[in-house]
Image (cartoon, rainbow, N blue to C red):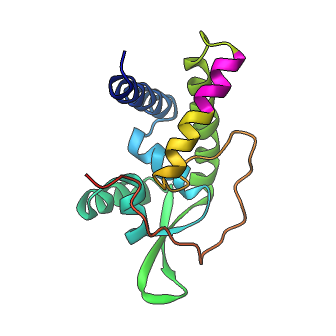
Amino acid sequence: MGFVTALVRSSFLVDAVYAESGRVHGITAQQGRLLCVLMVQPYGMRELGPMLGLAKSSLTGLVDRSVQRGLVRREADPEDGRAVRVALTAMGDELSKAFYAETCRRVERLSDGLDAADRELLARLLGRLVLKNKVPVVFMEPDQAPPAHNHNRTVRDSPLPAA
């Protein structure tokens, strides 16, 4: 199997993991992604769109549905009174941790057929690919705690390479 085919098909594996983790916790895969992103810190709507790969209208709908479920809240950006940030509620924080742990377990199982050396090599190569393409922090290492909220951090680069 070639590189492109393998990488695209592996993205489908991860999408399936998000979907199944979401089903277990009663949320959509998109809501799970949103919760994982917000584990790190609250983000503005302008930042979330590129991070999640969503158009403004799709992101607004996702956030609206998540607000209705009590998972996130909109709050004023202290640095820009016109801007709105999205943050986890207490319920969203609890659910994000459970969803994250479930997703980590499921992703870990995807590599059951690989030995330790192959897993390390795969992680190193994918890590280089992610860093080279400036993918924002949308998922942390399982042994990392979310960093303290840093509301000044912004994501200026799209997670996707130019076509």
Please name whichever residue, 84 or 92, is drawn nearer the observer in this view of the structure. Answer: 84
Please tell me which residue is depicted at 58% across the width and 73% down the height of the picture. 153
Predominant SS of the magenta segment? helix
Q: Is residue 163 above or below residue 56?
A: above
In the rendered structure, the answer to whether residue 58 lies left or right of residue 28 reads left
Segment tinted magenta in the rendering? 116-123
Q: Position of residue 98 (x, y in %)?
A: 63, 39
Please tell me which residue is depicted at 50% across the width and 55% down the height of the picture. 71
In the rendered structure, the answer to whether residue 34 lies left or right of residue 63 reads right
Q: Is residue 81 above or below residue 77?
A: below
Please state the total of marks drawn on the protein image.
0
Residue 96 visible in the current orientation: yes
In the rendered structure, the answer to whether residue 136 lies left or right of residue 59 reads right
Q: Where is residue 96 in the image (x, y as percent from the top left)?
A: 59, 46
Q: Quadrant of residue 97?
A: top right
Please name whichever residue, 84 or 5, is drawn nearer the observer in this view of the structure. Answer: 5
Residue 102 visible in the current orientation: no
Q: Where is residue 48 in the image (x, y as percent from the top left)?
A: 42, 62
Quarter of the picture containing the N terminus is: top left
Please tell me which residue is depicted at 44% across the width and 70% down the height of the picture. 156
Q: Does the magenta portion include 38?
A: no
Please tell me which residue is depicted at 31% across the width and 63% down the height of the picture. 60
Q: In this view, does 143 lie above or below 9?
A: below
Q: Which residue lies furthest to the top in this view?
A: 113
Q: Where is residue 135 in the image (x, y as percent from the top left)?
A: 48, 53
Q: In which quarter of the image is residue 89?
A: bottom right
